[in-house]
Image (cartoon, rainbow, N blue to C red):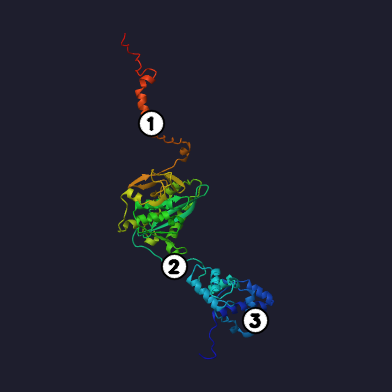
Amino acid sequence: MPASVLPPPPDAVLFRFAVLSKVRIRILRGEDLVVAVRAVAAEEHIGVDQRPSQVSARSIYRWFAAWTAGGVQALAPALRTPTASHVLDPGLVTFLAAEKRADGRASVPELLRRAVDVGLLQRPEDVDRTTAWRALRRLGVRTRTGTAPPLDQRRFAKENRMQIMLCDGKHFRAGRQGLRRVAIFFIDDASRYVPQVVVGTSETAVLFLRGLHGVLERVGKMDILYDDHGSGFTADDSHGVLTNLEIGIVHGTVGYPPGRGKIERFNRTAEDAILRHLAQDDVDPDCMALELRLAHYLEHDYNRRPHRSLGKQTPEARFLADDRSLRPYDDGEELRRKFFVWEERLVSNDHVVSLDSVFYEVPPGLGGQRVRIARDVLDPKHLLLDHEGQSIRLRPVDLHANARARRGHAPALVEPPTSAVGAARSAAERALAPITQPDGGFPAADPDKEPPWT
């Protein structure tokens, strides 16, 4: 390249020169430098990234001084050596970064205390925690406490029906008063078919399990259930029932939109089509009434509407055309038994066990022993006691009836055994009866019989 030919200036230099050109034009028009700089600083400029941006008056003054002293080449950004901190010791910063990468849950004050333990600091207060936090951020260290999101985050889709069932709760308002309600939808991942919806006042394990029971009755068992990590899905009862059913469960990762794309898209569709119309005066806010409305919408509208992601095919047609066999539960009683979870309880001396602050009576003879109780997760008052191979239905204790009932009589005292003296006295009384008794020992006369001497 000839020496007289200079390389083109970088984009940053051109941007700064364009801003100064506006200042120069105003000065040539007769404006003062201060007025011209203020006017240009208030304007928007097209930045290097082709986006509107503003430049501070301080930067314009600095660029104007550099251009006046050295021309256009002086507008080039100064090269800066990247450094984590200009005030902290490099060894301390390296130690803090290594500890934070090894223990992501450690806070900045905890890291400073560790630096004291290894002799890098005398006191944790010698270093401002904000300064240490900024140094970690400049090094690209994740400063949030807790477990970092998994690096392998990718979109997923199953090929066949009932391989993954997506489950999510959508909150909405209903009725004239705008009461809070939540609808839990069960969405097949491969076909987008929604076989079940349940409505409640809050997202609980009972509501989720009731919907799961309906899915199993209608279309059968799925391989994996994917949820949004809600409280109703992470409850112990939910895990116990899914373990009984041998169904895998995956809790969605927080801040992982690629894994929830289908759920969020369905939520937007349901919101626009029906949920936003339920907060009206003529809508019954009862949960079962709302559940019937949503079930009718799914069966007659959503499941029969073509989807672009399915190649203009409806979710119902895609679900029914799948050749993967379904696994329904033909025996309703067997399915119902899967929704019982077992717990151990200690029986009190008055033959009572406590469960969820409710007292239940158990058969006598089990006081002080531990017993296994099967609890129905869909009906908390349905308890069964496993006793000698039999299932006994437990009933709550009627405390008010016990308070009014009369107490049982004390047991009768046992008479002491007859001594030898007492036996002799009884024999004497029998022998001397004709002498000692008033009637002389003869039986009393029967008034209905005539005497023999008549």
**Which tag, 1 or 3, sits closer to the chain's start?**
3
Q: Element at badge 3? A: helix
- Report, in whole angstroms, how far the alpha carbon at label 1 lies from the one at label 3: 136 Å
Q: What element carries label 1?
A: helix
Please tell me whether mark 2 sits on a helix, a strand or a loop.
loop
Q: How far apart are marks 3 and 2 (CA)?
A: 49 Å
Q: Which amino acid does label 2 sit on?
A: Pro
Q: Mark 2 points at which residue?
A: 150
Q: Which kind of residue does numbered mark 1 sit on?
A: Val
Q: Is residue 236 something one can see in this rendering?
A: yes
Residue extending furthest toward the top: 454
Mark nearer the viewer, 2 or 1 = 1
Q: Which mark is residue 65?
A: 3
Q: Position of residue 182 (x, y in %)?
A: 47, 52
Residue with the mark numbered 1:
421
Name which residue type carries label 3: Ala
Residue 13 location, x and y as percent? 57, 80
Depth order, front residue of 105/273: 105
Asked if residue 59 lies left or right of residue 181, the reply is right
Q: In which quarter of the image is residue 81?
A: bottom right
